[in-house]
Amino acid sequence: MSAPIPDPRDRLIVALDLPSVGAAESIVSRLGDTATFYKIGYELGFAGGLGFARELIAEGKKVFIDFKLHDIGNTVARGVASLAALGASFATVHAYPQTMRAAMEGKGASPLRILAVTVLTSYDDADLDEAGYRADVASTVAARVAQAREIGVDGIVCAPTDAAKVRGLLGAKGAIVTPGVRPDGAATGDQKRVATPFAAIRAGADHLVVGRPILASPDPAAAARAVQAEVARALSAQVPSA
Ligand SMILES: O=c1ccn([C@@H]2O[C@H](COP(=O)(O)O)[C@@H](O)[C@H]2O)c(=O)[nH]1
């Protein structure tokens, strides 16, 4: 049997950073068929979002649970096993070796893909220094990707500005997922390491996570389609002409 043809709409993951299931239902309905992949983080997750994740999956959408797990190995492995049973497509853990190994053990043979978060996109060198790290963002990302690759995690979450370097370190295998994506002119908010959808894809990202630029738009479906159009433009620019 041949491999399923990937749906290009899956390149965009819409972050449902919303306070209630009702608010999420409203955005999902306005996005309709435009969006196929949704991310659920703390805000919606702690407000009934896991039940909503189940509904989205039952409707054929893909779900990324972004709780960035980090705990003792037993707790991480068992938490990940529950996310695998839920039917999530992606789940995040912080890129600490013990945590990454536990997550890979917890997912078992399920299709859940474990993504290791390297350095949050809201952090710059000064933020790492303030948190007690003695290495800058670039070297911390590189060290974490090397460990993630060694452990065999399924993918990496990094800033779009790190994606080219991460792709070089990770090789062709392994998904690169980038939050911190901002269409030209969009407010950056608390994000510090940002790039446009076009630049992120050109740098080697497989999936872009976009929240506020879509959620805050008067027309979320148009905003999502604009991101997808940039993705398509970047992908076609990557293919050398015959
Ligand atoms: O390094 C990281 C890891 C995760 N995120 C999450 O992505 C979205 C981004 O939302 P925007 O509104 O597009 O800024 C959000 O859910 C974060 O928790 C990240 O931003 N950076």
Image: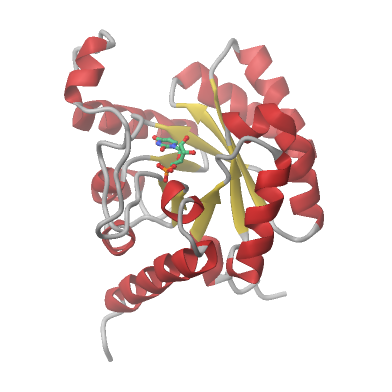
Whether 162 is drawn above or below 19: the answer is below
User: Which quadrant would residue 149 be assigned to in this image?
Assistant: top left
Residue found at x 34% / y 60% = 197
Residue 152 or residue 241, whichever sits in front: 241
Q: Is residue 58 left or right of residue 222?
A: right
Residue that protrudes farthest toward the front in the picture: 218
Q: Is residue 238 left or right of residue 102?
A: left
Residue found at x 60% / y 22% = 102
Ligand 1 falls in quadrant: top left
Residue 31 or residue 74, whichever sits in front: 31
For residue 88, say whether it is visible.
no
Residue found at x 70% / y 23% = 79
Whether 170 is drawn above or below 151: the answer is below
Residue 36 placement (x, y as % from top left) = 62, 62
Residue 135 placement (x, y as % from top left) = 19, 18
User: Which quadrant would residue 101 be assigned to in this image?
Assistant: top right
Quadrant occupied by the C terminus: bottom left
Whether 152 is drawn above or below 8: the answer is above
Residue found at x 27% / y 45% = 194
Residue 25 placement (x, y as % from top left) = 71, 51
